[in-house]
Amino acid sequence: MNRPAFWVAFAVISIGAAFVGIRYFPRAFSIVSLDITMDRDRALGEARTIAQRNRLGPPGFREAASFALDTEAQTFIELEGGGKEAFTAMMRSGLYAAYTWRVRHFREGETNESTIRFTPDGVPYGFVETLKEEAPGAALDAAAARAIAERDAASRWGVDLARYALVEQGQDRRTGGRVDHTFTYERPSPTLNDGRYRLRLVVSGDRLTEVTPFIRIPEAFSRRYASMRAANEAIGIGSVVGMALLYVLGGIGVGLFFMLRKRYVLWRHAAAWGLAVGAMQALAAINELPLIWMTYDTALPRSTFLAQQIALVAAGFIGFSVFFGLSFVAAETLTRRAFGHHPQFWRVWSREPGASVQVAGRTVAGYLLVSLFFAYDVLLYLVTTKMLGWWSPSEALLHPDVLATYAPWLSAIANSFQAGFWEEALFRAVPIAGAALIGDRVGQRRLFIVLGFIVQAIVFGAGHAPYPNQPSFARPVELILPSIGFGLLYLYFGLLPGIVLHFTFDVVWFALPIFLAQAPGILLQKGLVVVMTLVPLWMVLWRRVQVGRWTRLSPADLNAAWTPPPAVERPVAIVPVTHATLGTRAKTAWFAAGGLSAIVIVFLAVADRSRTPPLNLRSAEAADLARQAIARRGAALAPRWRVMPMPDNGSSGAHEFVSETAGEARRTELVGRYLPGPRWNVRAASFEGDVADRAEEWRVYITPAGEARGLQHRLPEGRAGAALDEAAARTLAVRALADRFGLQRNQVREISAKPARLKARTDWTFTFVDTTVAPLPKGEPRVEVQIAGDELASAGRFVYVPEEWERQQRAASTRNLVLQVLQTLVFAGMLVAAAVTGLIAWSRRRYTPRLFLAGAALMLLISMVRTANNWPTVLASLTTAAPLPLQVIGGIAVALVGLTLIAVLVGLALGALPHALRGTSTLDGGEALRLGVAAGLVAAAAAAAATALRTPVWAHVPDLSALGSTVPVLRLALDPITTLLTRTAVLIAALAAVEHATSGWTRRRVPAALLLAIVGLLAGGLPAGSHLGGWLLGGLVLAAALLVTYTRLLRFDLTMVPIALGTLAIVITLARGVERAHPAALSGSVIGALLAGGVAWWWFRALRQARTAVDAGGPHAQV
């Protein structure tokens, strides 16, 4: 490799591979040839012209543009609508433009907006204008509206209606009196097998507000495709499980634990690179902001929308940076330990090694190998698609959206940087180096390296299976040889060449649209892509210039030369903590506060008793009643059908709207009629048989009194049936009103009639207003009737919520999402920080392993039992479009990984607590126990007060979730335990850190108090709907309670925390039980309270004993 002839031959082979790849690329991959003569600026300009001419959109609008593909239509056509040739022919003939420019005109706070579409060559291709529901307009009959639709579609949008036939015609009367008409047309020929070319025209009042060509895709295909995709997803889940168990728990967790003990870990460089990769991902997300405005909900203030994006970017940056950093630490550390002949990775770009011929060779080799891997991909797809019939979607190499970002080069570089660096570190270095170290341990190094190669190839390939390719194993098979190639590069030459190759290879793919684009300033973007891609080479050349000559790696530059620093026994630095004494008067005051809190709790519990009737029907009874209701419809469920009852507390209805606008009395009056109350939601479905037929489902709602209401029958689209006209369908709907609700035709007002023309029948949906109910100040009591062919499919009542109110609720939901992201960051961050601190402490032998084992085992055991007990809920949520075994296996695998990771994190945090408590204040055991109970009662009273403040009356619903489990009593009994363990681990770790940081609350009190207040504020959950004020008040109560309880009591002995949290859990559990929302509520809650008390007491004693042992045995005591 040191001879020039080798590099000349290597370069020639690389050039030849590039030629082969380019030569056969169009034959291997289906490339859609698009004549994109319209650029983004032209699309924006012509959209403004059209909007001004046709008076579309709001005044003073903002604009956004995107070039999009109808991927659903493409997938259908290529798989079942005639193949890739049919898709290409369709695009060429202009039957349907799957690729379109979309220009959106919108304004903050305005419902009115428009989206105008153009073909790639700039021909207007339809539009949609959204009007306010209350906007005034005419109430034309269908004939007059159709005349307007056909006239304006032809004159203004160039639609040739002679090629179409009308197949659907519906109308919808808006609350402001305007009548909107929808007309759907279909081309008799040509067809796409079961797919049809259609056109939708909408007239709102007397204005044409929509012209949309589309392809009607049969439901059967969507379900077949979902079933096919389930295998891809299952393989991907397998990769995630393997990564989590082997690489994260095994490589990062166990591997770094032993490396920390050997003082082998170098974390600073890895942390810096983790931050760099995380920052690049965050910048790439910000770079997409111009395109994000296409999905902006104008119901949100722009500030809220931007806050949402910032929160998501910040959460991603923090999470990715930590995970990437840990991955890099593990990869480099294990590599340094396992492969002494590799250059030290963090030094390859330092002055002397960076100018070496070895580093230069590894860098150049990475670049030269790109074309070989590229040619392999091309030839593989050429063979598999032409000879084996494998499928991957056709692609257009030019993506104008790339040019809409702030810096087009950034996204290509950032995504490639992340994939090249992180995947080679975690998916290559960790398994191979870890396998080598295990092999060294057992004396089978080569065997374990081979096993490591096999594992990394399987996991890496399976991780790419979710891509839209068929068969499901296409990508895993494709990546076997590349995985082996990357592995060999790593094995012989270290991380550098694989990272350079992977990074550059991905850049080639991601940057193709940039290099094929023609636009002002594009040369700069292309140049930046090249410059950034060659950064590894620039680093080598820079070091070469610095040194003035080519060097060679010295033995000191290899991993074998690195030795851990000598162990230095340092005294454990314990920040002096002032041991304050809790006086007798203070103790008495806390006992009194606990007693008073108990009275407050009882008072609030009585005042907060749910007014809704209990759901005393058991699951089996609800299932039997549902079967009887279905049988009365003349349907007999075969053995393959599963009847799956699920409890429903009724919170899904428009309770908040009615309560806020009409008063609580009207809301209560409508519960059980137009607003849902507690009930059983019984779903009957089959997971066997033809996937298209499995779309058939039944749904029945069973009231607490045992009445079957709202029976729904969902038929597959392909099921044959009648094709009724509007009058005949309306007759059936009116009959259903009388039979189901006792409503006569003169007691309702029709709002809309909407048809759906299917392949073998016509369905209808009618909506009526119930005029027998006293009018609401806002909204309406409505009834919806669905007719499938000539069968009554469903008839249900609901409260119609006006658009403006719904928009306000969407804004509130988005704000709550931002708060949820913040809560997750804070509490997940606290748990991870406590766990990492515990891992480091364990590696330094300042840990209590038995508490780790006890906490992790108990957490995992209870979590697994709870998950298994929750099987009915899981089953009822599964889709019939995917194979049941794949869904079950995938769910079990994900649950196993997630529960194991959480159990390990909690266990790591718990095991570190005795040493964290070393040197803190203590109380007598009996006093600590009693005061802990008092603190828990105060916390429970504060929690009850906070709940009362943040929970409006309409949001008081019974907790019926336990009824969705196999054994409800078991669910209620185990529910408090995992929460108690997690809170104990996080809260004691946090309070111990505060205690040491403030030296016993004698300094830095302001920042510490602020942090505790934030934790207390966020501990109250999320606001109920739009009630931010109540949530804030409740959060302040919790913040004050946490601050006062810690500063005035808990800091005198932090081992009281388990007792306090256990008391809190007991109170909350019993409060739910005394509501008796269902038969198992009280007994399950009593058992849960006893278990919570027992667990709290055990951990109280265990922490006190362990802390005593640590204080007696010194900083390295292992207890």
Image (cartoon, rainbow, N blue to C red):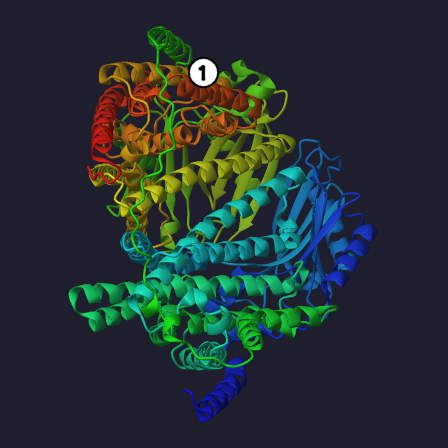
Residue found 33% across the figure and 54% down from its top: 252
| Residue 1005 locus on image (x, y percent) | 49, 25
Q: Is residue 620 visible in the rendered structure shown here? A: yes
| Residue 698 locus on image (x, y percent) | 37, 41
Depth order, front residue of 124/1020: 1020
Mark 1, other Cα within 10 Å: few <14 / some 14–19 / many ≥20: some
| Quarter of the picture holding the N terminus | bottom left
Q: What is the tally of numbered marks visible in this picture?
A: 1
Depth order, front residue of 471/61: 61
| Quarter of the picture holding the C terminus | top left
* Quadrant hosting residue 159: bottom right
Q: Is residue 83 visible in the rendered structure shown here? A: no
Report the amino acid beneath label 1.
Ala
Left or right, 625 with reference to 733: left
Q: Residue furthest right?
A: 53
Indicate the secondary structure of the residue bearing disc 1.
helix
Q: Is residue 400 above or below residue 319?
A: below
Q: Is residue 841 above or below residue 777?
A: below
Residue found 53% across the figure and 34% down from its top: 816
Depth order, front residue of 403/983: 983
Q: Residue furthest left?
A: 442
Quickly name the residue at label 1: 945
Residue found 19% across the figure and 63% down from its top: 441
Residue found 33% across the figure and 26% down from its top: 920
Left or right, 897 with reference to 328: left
Depth order, front residue of 375/315: 315
